[in-house]
Image: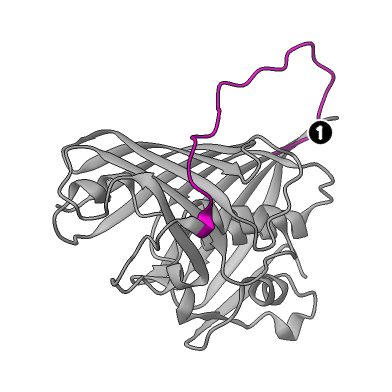
Amino acid sequence: MIGGLFIVRGRKNKMNFDDLINGFRSEEIGALTMDAPQSWAQGRTLYGGLSAALCHVSAMASAEIDKPLRSAVIAFVGPSSGQLTGSAEIMRQGKSTIMMDAVLHGEKGIGTKALLIYGNARDSKLNQSDLAAPQVDAPEDCPSLWGDRKAANFARNFELRRAGGLTPMGGNERGDMLVWVRHATEASVDDTAALFALADVLPPACFTMMSEGAPISTVTWSLEFLMPEVEVANNWFLMKSVAEHTADGYSSQAMYVWDRQGRPVIAARQNVTVFY
């Protein structure tokens, strides 16, 4: 690694998550022409969850960070396509926290920009949570989210089981999705990166309000990581996404992730553009 700079070049063959992350953060300079598989594409860009994950990996490789990620703000500025480069720098570092600025460039400029805050736990008299997991059937007893539909390229790297909520493209009056999700292959090389990838896999909640497909694009994504240690591997996680306000071609949605034991893992929000 030189100056926190990493390079990815596109190709069409399939690559599992761990191999992709290992290739991206390789310290062999000649190997930093790692291919970004078409199997992780989301339309004309790299899948957003993976783009955010690569920003985190760039940050971890650019500074000595021994703290868990606590918060992230992601802006999807433009398409992360063609040859990609990731870079990161320290914005501020204190005794317990470090704030990183990470960028993923595509061939046409900035693709994804991330503000990442890593922080140690501190002693506190407060311990409270109102994020109880919904009561749902086990993932093994839930049907596939997609049914007979063909999933997008990137979504085939995950297994999704509908646990409740509403049907995608069901023409419903509100947007509400409740889905069990896991990586299709074990993702263990970087749990935080694996969580980023997993936490963005659901279609926007307003997708359940549509009666037919239409372009949808996430603009911003803010996440709060509630558990400092999470083993992702190919474990199941329950995800809930609710469209709280949809108008004028934009949808504001709240998103939550719990582990299989019902513990809250992520609380997040997205602003989504809707061409419908």
Name the residue: 75% across, 55% down: 60
Q: Quadrant of the N terminus?
A: bottom right
Q: Nearer the viewer, residue 216 or 158?
A: 158
Residue 253 image offset from top left, x and y in percent: 36, 37
Residue 129 located within the stretch drawn in magenta: yes
Residue found at the very far top of the displayed protein: 125
Q: Can residue 81 be seen in the rendering of this structure?
A: yes
Residue 11 image offset from top left, x and y in percent: 50, 87
Q: Is residue 14 left or right of residue 255?
A: right
Name the residue: 71% across, 56% down: 191
Q: 43 above or below 201?
A: below
Q: How is the image coloured?
A: one colour
* Callout 1 crowding tier (Cα within 10 Å): few <14, some 14–19, many ≥20: some
Residue 260 image offset from top left, x and y in percent: 62, 46
Classify residue 103 by image quadrant: bottom right
Magenta region, mostly helix, strand or loop?
Answer: loop
Give the magenta part as a residue range.
118-140
Q: Is residue 91 left or right of residue 121?
A: left
Residue 135 located within the stretch drawn in magenta: yes
Q: Is residue 62 left or right of residue 7?
A: right
Q: Give the structural element (helix, strand or loop) at label 1.
A: loop
Classify residue 96 by image quadrant: top right
Q: Is residue 163 left or right of residue 267?
A: left
- Which residue is denoted by mark 1 in the rendering? 120
Amino acid, disc 1: Asn
Classify residue 151 by image quadrant: bottom left
Residue 244 image offset from top left, x and y in percent: 30, 31
Name the residue: 49% across, 34% down: 134
Q: Can residue 88 be seen in the rendering of this structure?
A: no
